[in-house]
Image: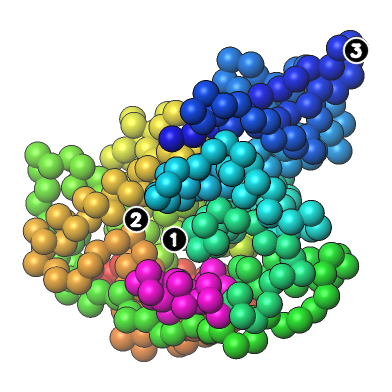
């Protein structure tokens, strides 16, 4: 099996940029692959063999280094996919074969390079969740292409249909297929706007719609059983149930928003927070049931955060939130079994439960914003933004009292 390493050759002139290159080693043969990345000495971590941000530097330089970090990461991924594919071939291969296949990605603007740039920009803008979904879409496409890059001029309807067929044969559901297709279409259209390729409408014949999914809402009786469940001696399940109930009490607050709630967000009987997904500011009346949960875990919530989801401030907060969410969702399966709930229980169910129960209470659709029951969350936001928050608070109080 070939070995792939990233290397840095510093400049012989002090203060000048050196070159990043890749080293492919197979059967004691070493080959080098040049890259376009040029770095200063403090932008390379020799111990980790990685591109890093240097000391200081302009915003443009930081953007360049961020692009280099992303570009190197994806190049290494491509090379490793190529090596894995070569390992599966009968008859063996050489280091030159790996280098040649990598070079066949094309000399012009490519989908991989452009999408890397888009992902880097999203991260710089703080749109981490969107950057993650774009990275997932790119990973999926790279698996489909076997690690081969594709020139933007080669992205056509035939390629899109082949990718759609590959995803369906891999067992992906229609909404996942559509989700990845819409991301690639958005990236492609952005490249068209920048003049990097001509508009050929390659996604016109593939599915980019949204199938209606089975609602994940729970009836009021099931939510009541969750609330009343005795989980003494089972702290992990108790915590998962409390996080679910906190989301329900706060009108279906998403787990990421719960994770980043700060103690200062609660003041004068009101919780005010901004949705990380949309940037929309929401105001929620601070009910006793919410305060009880916050107080119960107050000792486990260090630093500025209200709930013990991000427990190591200063570390990778997003990774902590995702790890905790995965743990909570796993625990909720056991909670559901203990409460006699057959439906697959996740944190997301709290949002649908609040919406469906609100509708069953004859609360006007404009108040609950059908969005939590609407097909379009944009419509939901429009409804919620146009309402006096006291109307929504009264609706929420009515639901909580019914428990």
What label does residue 396 carry, if any?
A: none
**x and y percent of residue 199 in the render?**
80, 79
Residue on which the image places disc 2: 246
What label does residue 253 carry, if any?
A: 1
Q: Residue at x 68, y 30 (%)?
A: 32
**Residue 180 within the magenta-colored segment of the rendering:** yes
Viewer-nearest residue: 374 or 327: 327
Q: Secondary structure at mark 1?
A: loop
Q: Is residue 332 above or below residue 184?
A: above
Q: Is residue 257 above or below residue 234?
A: below
**Residue 132 within the magenta-colored segment of the rendering:** no
- State the extent of the magenta-drawn residues as a range: 161-181
Q: Residue most toward the front? A: 91
Are the residues tagged 2 and 3 within 8 Å (C-beta)?
no
Gap in angstroms between the C-alphas marked 2 and 3: 60 Å
Disc number lying in front (2 or 3): 3
Gap in angstroms between the C-alphas marked 1 and 2: 8 Å
Location of residue 394 (image quadrant)? bottom left
Residue on which the image places disc 3: 13
Location of residue 109 (image quadrant)? bottom right
Q: Residue at x 55, y 32 (%)?
A: 4
**Quadrant of the image containing the C terminus:** bottom left
Are the residues tagged 1 and 2 within 8 Å (C-beta)?
yes
**x and y percent of residue 288 in the render?**
34, 53
**x and y percent of residue 184 in the render?**
63, 68
Q: Residue at x 34, y 55 (%)?
A: 246
Q: Secondary structure at mark 2?
A: helix
Q: Secondary structure at mark 3?
A: loop
């Amino acid at each position: 099996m070939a070995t792939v390493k990233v290397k840095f050759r510093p400049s012989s002139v002090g203060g000048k940029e050196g070159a990043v290159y890749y080293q492919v080693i197979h059967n004691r043969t070493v080959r080098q692959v040049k890259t376009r990345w040029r770095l200063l000495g403090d932008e390379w971590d020799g111990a980790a063999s990685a591109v890093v941000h240097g000391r200081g530097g302009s915003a443009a330089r930081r953007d360049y280094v961020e692009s280099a970090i992303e570009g190197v990461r994806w190049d290494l991924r491509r090379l490793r996919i190529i090596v894995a594919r070569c390992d599966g071939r009968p008859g063996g291969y050489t280091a030159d074969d790996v280098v040649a296949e990598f070079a066949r990605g094309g000399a012009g603007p490519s989908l991989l390079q452009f999408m890397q740039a888009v992902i880097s920009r999203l991260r710089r803008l703080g749109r981490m969740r969107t950057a993650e979904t774009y990275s997932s879409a790119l990973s999926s496409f790279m698996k489909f292409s076997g690690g081969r890059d594709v020139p933007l001029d080669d992205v056509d309807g035939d390629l899109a249909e082949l990718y759609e067929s590959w995803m369906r044969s891999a067992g992906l559901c229609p909404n996942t297929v559509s989700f990845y297709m819409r991301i690639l279409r958005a990236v492609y259209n952005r490249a068209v706007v920048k003049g990097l390729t001509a508009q050929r409408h390659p996604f016109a014949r593939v599915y980019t719609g949204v199938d209606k999914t089975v609602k994940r809402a729970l009836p009021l009786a099931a939510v009541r059983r969750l609330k009343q469940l005795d989980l003494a001696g089972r702290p992990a399940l108790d915590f998962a149930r409390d996080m679910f109930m906190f989301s329900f009490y706060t009108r279906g607050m998403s787990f990421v928003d719960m994770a980043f709630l700060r103690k200062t967000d609660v003041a004068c009987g009101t919780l005010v927070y901004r949705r990380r997904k949309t940037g929309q500011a929401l105001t929620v009346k601070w009910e006793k049931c919410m305060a009880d949960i916050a107080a119960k875990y107050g000792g486990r919530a260090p630093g500025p955060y209200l709930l013990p989801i991000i427990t190591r401030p200063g570390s990778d907060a997003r990774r902590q939130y995702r790890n905790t969410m995965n743990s909570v969702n796993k625990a909720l399966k056991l909670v559901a079994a203990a409460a006699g709930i057959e439906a697959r229980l996740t944190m997301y169910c709290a949002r649908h439960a609040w919406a469906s129960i609100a509708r069953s209470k004859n609360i006007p659709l404009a108040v609950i914003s059908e969005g939590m029951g609407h097909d379009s969350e944009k419509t939901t936001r429009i409804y919620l933004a146009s309402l006096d928050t006291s109307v929504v608070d009264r609706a929420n109080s009515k639901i909580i009292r019914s428990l």
